[in-house]
Image (cartoon, grey):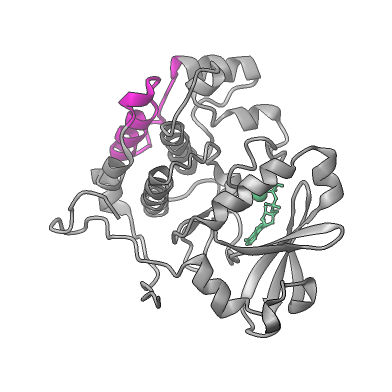
Amino acid sequence: GSRPDTVMLSGSAQPTPRLPSTHLLNRLLFSTPFRRRLTIDDFEIGRPLGKGKFGNVYLARLKESHFIVALKVLFKSQIEKEGLEHQLRREIEIQAHLQHPNILRLYNYFHDARRVYLILEYAPRGELYKELQKSHTLDEQHTATIMEELADALTYCHEKKVIHRDIKPENLLLGFKGEVKIADFGWSVHTPSLRRKTMCGTLDYLPPEMIERRTYNEKVDLWCIGVLCYELLVGYPPFESPSHNETYRRILKVDLRFPPSLPLGAQDLVSKLLRYQPLERLPLAQIMEHPWVRAHSRRVLPPSVQMAS
Ligand code: ATP
Ligand code: MG
């Protein structure tokens, strides 16, 4: 990690543990006799976890090691029909190289005549979107924890020159302890998810520079987590409106209004992220050290793994 030294501050953000590399995991978990490629016969398939636009996701277990994964099955015919071969390759390429406790791991992939299979980390607590639908809002603890996790994960991404561009509850999964896992890399950009029935739902997280089709940079992710923080605490996104045009207008004006019940610390954080000028948005390192985040975050990190070389 290359974040500034903050170890002296009590209650300050902890350094991210090292995770085993994809290469090492593949040697440990997915090695097959005579180094043949994996096939679907190496897995026991369990219950469906969900349906995507191009195929389904199943709980699955490797026969040999009993290692549990989520297997995403995509149909080649559909991907080809939509001309998304390059996009899929890019998603695989990006996600396979990201190793962080708050980014959904892509361990490996294989294909047969009709399908492409992505071997993904299993997120036992499912989607943040569903959790939000069920409980309407999250409390300060849970929201602050998610903000710290996302700031740390995005710091890692931005160091690798990866911009997510599509942070929203639909693209966030939850791990065993409720920790957030960013999913849907570089894919959802070209295939906006149709989960929210009203089209304006998909506009709620768009930053001004993307609406105005200006060139944008990694600071779009700061805007998105500002919108997310508001939605998690308030129950609806900040610029939600009856029509597209109205949503666009409110985003471009940064027409931000806080319900009086929203804690002042959270108001301070959100208003420092939702700035029209990308350069004025609070940097990721300062989100992690923001007083409201430090006061409420209960982030738990997985045990660090010693690397065998
Ligand atoms: P898109 O095709 O645009 O990505 P999507 O995000 O709705 O659409 P998938 O990513 O294919 O579709 O996932 C479908 C659903 O399966 C998710 O919404 C989620 O509920 C579940 N799911 C996907 N991956 C995992 C995982 N690794 N662990 C647990 N559940 C998962
Ligand atoms: Mg998805």
Residue 158 rendering spot, x and y as whole percentages: 41, 42
Residue 75 percent coordinates (x, y): 82, 53
Quadrant of res 229 = top left
Does residue 141 appear anywhere in the picture? yes
Residue at 35% in and 65% down: 17
Residue at left 47%, top 25%? 216
Residue 70 vertical position relative to residue 152 in the rendered view, above or below: below
Vertically, is 26 above or below 133? below
Q: Indicate the quadrant containing the C terminus: top left, top right, bottom left or bottom right.
A: bottom left
Residue 183 lies in the magenta stretch: no
Which x, y percent locates residue 221?
45, 36
Residue at horizontal 70 percent and vertical 72 percent from the top? 60
Quadrant containing the N terminus is: bottom left
Query: Which is nearer the eye, 82 or 142?
Result: 82
Q: Nearer the viewer, residue 240 or 253?
A: 253
**237 left or right of 14 in image:** right
Based on the picture, tell me whether residue 280 belongs to the magenta stretch: yes
208 on left or right of 268? right
Q: Which residues are magenta?
A: 253-281
Q: Nearer the viewer, residue 167 or 1?
A: 1
Nearer to us in this view, 271 or 39: 39
